Image: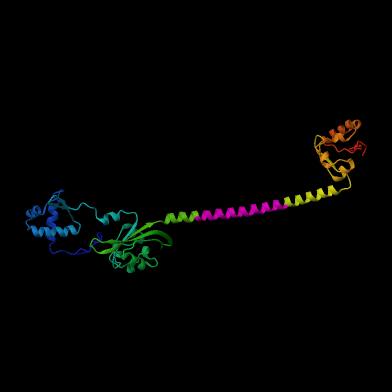
């Protein structure tokens, strides 16, 4: 009998297939099920033999048993075969037996590998040539799984010149023939990896831009600091020159209020610098010269350069 790869069992022809078929056909007639006695009378086989055949069918998953009170009710299994469920999965599914022989693959695997079931099922993984399992230490991973460990790992696969990424789950399982096996579930995360790669590249590019901008900003700050230091140094030199000048230097604001006098100017007039600061320039001339000074000051405020002689009064009111 050709193995049915859609189920995970290697089922051989039974010497009492005819009796099993009779029981299954009879059970199709009722959704509620029948007792052993009812089945025995209906198919004309002794009760003990029917009970034995029902045990076989229960073990194989074809028939299920329900206990209602003291009665045992047998009916056809309404469960969907595991292989049918796996075939609907969007993941890549591979089932191996304990000798690492491939027992099942779903359509996603066949499409990816561009192979048929006959090319894959029934062959050891070393001979099947699956790209999805062409990964380093695959035998070690499978060996650890057979020892009862759940293994999770990311897998990088080269196929048709492209690189695919999968999140692999290697899970110890029991096959439908009752033997140990391995269920391999591969989740395609290629798009996630590509998005992650693009995001990392974007972050790197932005980091480079920010680093460049930061470098330029630091350079500008350094240049501004150098200019500021140079200006302050120049200002200190200018201030020193003014303070040490042998001529009186006097500055005032738009309204004629004193803003600065150097040491020489304060010595000439006999005032201290603090006494003169904030005082109108007109208060240092005689009443006769005030109108003349105000006229000249008005012209200066309009932007005219004025050169004129004027007598300032010292602190003791004598001419300077």
Residue 212, quarter of the rendered image: bottom right
125 up-or-down from 270: above or below: below
Left-right relation of 256 to 313? left
Asked if residue 260 can be seen in this view, the reply is no
For this rendering, which residue is in front, 252 or 164? 252
For this rendering, which residue is in front, 8 or 275? 275
| Residue occupying image coordinates x 8% and y 57% | 47
Residue 115, quarter of the rendered image: bottom left
| Residue occupying image coordinates x 70% and y 53% | 223
Check residue 260 for magenta coloring: no
Residue 50 x %, y %? 10, 58
Report the quarter where the N terminus lies: bottom left
Residue 179, quarter of the rendered image: bottom left
| Residue occupying image coordinates x 33% and y 67% | 143
Report the quarter where the C terminus lies: top right
For this rendering, which residue is in front, 76 or 113? 76
Residue 182 x %, y %? 30, 63
Dominant secondary-structure state across the stretch colored magenta: helix
| Residue occupying image coordinates x 84% and y 49% | 241
Left-right relation of 234 to 182? right
- How is the model colour-coded? rainbow
Asked if residue 40 can be seen in this view, the reply is yes
Residue 144 x %, y %? 34, 66
Task: Provide the residue span drawn in magenta.
Answer: 200-226
Check residue 202 for magenta coloring: yes
């Amino acid at each position: 009998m050709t193995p049915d790869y859609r189920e995970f069992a290697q089922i051989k022809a039974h010497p009492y297939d005819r009796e099993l078929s009779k029981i299954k056909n009879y059970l199709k007639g009722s959704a509620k099920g029948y007792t052993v006695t009812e089945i025995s009378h209906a198919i004309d086989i002794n009760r003990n033999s029917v009970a034995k055949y029902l045990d076989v069918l229960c073990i194989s998953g074809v028939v299920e048993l329900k206990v209602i009170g003291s009665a045992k009710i047998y009916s056809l299994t309404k469960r969907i075969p595991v292989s049918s469920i796996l075939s609907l999965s969007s993941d890549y599914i591979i089932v191996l037996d304990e000798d690492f022989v491939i027992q099942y693959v779903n359509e996603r695997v066949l499409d990816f590998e561009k192979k048929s079931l006959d090319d894959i099922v029934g062959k050891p993984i070393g001979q099947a040539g699956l790209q999805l399992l062409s990964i380093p230490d695959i035998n070690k991973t499978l060996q650890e799984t057979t020892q009862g460990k759940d293994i999770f790992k990311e897998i990088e696969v080269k196929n048709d010149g492209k690189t695919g990424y999968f999140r692999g789950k290697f899970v110890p399982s029991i096959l439908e023939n009752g033997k140990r096996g391995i269920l391999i579930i591969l989740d395609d995360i290629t798009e996630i990896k590509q998005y992650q790669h693009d995001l990392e590249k974007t972050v790197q590019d932005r980091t480079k831009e920010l680093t460049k901008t930061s470098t330029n900003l630091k350079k500008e700050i350094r240049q501004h600091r150098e200019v500021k230091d140079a200006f302050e140094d120049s200002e200190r030199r200018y201030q020193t020159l003014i303070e040490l000048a042998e001529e009186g230097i006097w500055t005032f604001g738009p309204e004629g209020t004193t803003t600065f006098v150097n040491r020489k100017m304060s010595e000439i007039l006999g005032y201290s610098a603090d006494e003169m600061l904030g005082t109108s320039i007109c208060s240092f001339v005689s009443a006769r010269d005030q109108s003349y000074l105000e006229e000249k000051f008005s012209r200066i405020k309009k932007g005219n350069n004025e050169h004129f002689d004027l007598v300032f009064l010292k602190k003791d009111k004598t001419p300077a």
